[in-house]
Amino acid sequence: MAVPRKEKAYEKYAWVIFFALGLFELLAFGFGYWILGGLGGNLQADSDALKNFTGITWDQLVARIPGIGSYISLLGREVGINHIGYSLLVIAISFVAYRKGERWAWYALWIVPARIIGFMANDLSGGSTFGVTAGLPFMVVALLGLLLPYRKFFPKKSVIRADSA
Amino acid sequence: MTSPRKERAYEKYAWTLLVVAWVSVLFRSVAAILLGGATYSSILEKLTGMTWEETLRTSPGMASVINSLALEGGLFLLGFPILGLAITFRSYRKGERWAWYVLLFLPLWLLAILLNTLKTPGSTGQSILVLFLIIAILGLLLPHRKFFPK
């Protein structure tokens, strides 16, 4: 006879990891980019980064190429809107489906570490190692969020979940 | 005694409208990843008077900034339709109410992108955004009674 499976604390609360990651992205990147995008993209705030790429400051750039400020703002705001949409879905899935132990949510949330790899690769291709330094701890945390509750989503055949018993 | 509610065809299959709208978002994301800075070349040209090729030739540093930002936008967008499709195929199709609320983010996202382009003079593609916005709203409103029965 199958024995009901008792959920361990780290399995029960692993959803909090994705909830926190989503919330962090919403606040730090989503609203951050959106607000900065409205002011001229993240580049205006980080004029040193712009100077490294182009050799000129934000003000010089806008004076040299009229209209480029609006274009960068458009892109910056869009990046912010994308962060907001994505992070809200991560928060919702982690809070409802992942917490309940629905297997599709476990598969779907692999997008979180995959996306961090994409972010790191994009930064590396631009010649910066910041993305790797900043992204690595988040990737480890995301992988822990997936691997710690592994048995909750894929229980051994001989046991069944306590809540479904 | 209440009789079981019979689902109408348009309620049963309205989720496919959301799939269409999500696929359009996915397409936008993949296009930005593949094309990078060239994704919005027509807007760039209208705003600056320079084509993408001219930008690459005359301001390579600026072009790599634009390229990186467009690529970042595409990469960061990629998760949104993937998670949205997962919710649509599983919880929304089953009629779970939380999914209905969460998928309101899709028309809101489309609206935000539309407003962003309207804010920028010379932007294009608004009619396509309006079309998918209507499709997404229909996908949510048609099966309304499935999620909120009387």
Image (tube, rainbow, N blue to C red):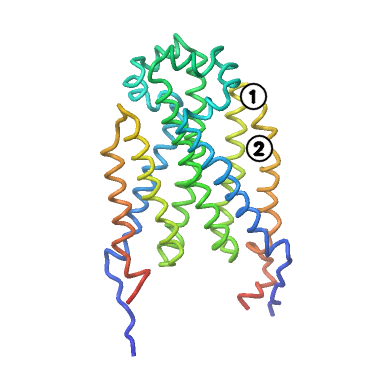
Residue at image mark 2:
A135
**The disc labelled 1 sits on which kind of residue?**
Ser
Query: For residue A54, which quarter of the picture?
Result: top right
Secondary structure beneath dot 1 equals loop
Q: How far apart are the alpha carbons under marks 2 and 1? A: 12 Å
Above or below B78: residue A51: above
**Residue A110 position in % (x across, y down):** 59, 48
Residue in the foreground of this view, choosing between A48 and B130: A48
**Residue A15 position in % (x across, y down):** 63, 58
Query: For residue A70, which quarter of the picture?
Result: top left
Above or below A117: residue B146: below
Secondary structure beneath dot 2 equals helix
Neighbour class for label 2 at 10 Å: few (<14), some, many (≥20)? some
**The disc labelled 2 sits on which kind of residue?**
Gly
Residue A152 lies left or right of residue A108; in this view the side is right
Above or below B94: residue A104: above
Q: Are marks 2 and 1 in contact (CB under 8 Å)?
A: no
Q: Chain of mark 1?
A: A
Residue located at (32% from left, 35% from top): B118
Q: Quadrant of the C terminus of chain A?
A: bottom right
Residue located at (58% from left, 50% from top): A23
**Residue B52 position in % (x across, y down):** 39, 17
Q: Chain of mark 2?
A: A
In terms of sequence position, does the residue under pointer 2 or pointer 1 come before the other? 1
Above or below B104: residue A112: above
Residue B138 lies left or right of residue A143; in this view the side is left
Residue A18 lies left or right of residue B23; in this view the side is right
Neighbour class for label 1 at 10 Å: few (<14), some, many (≥20)? few
Q: Residue furthest bottom?
A: B1
The tag on residue A128 is 1
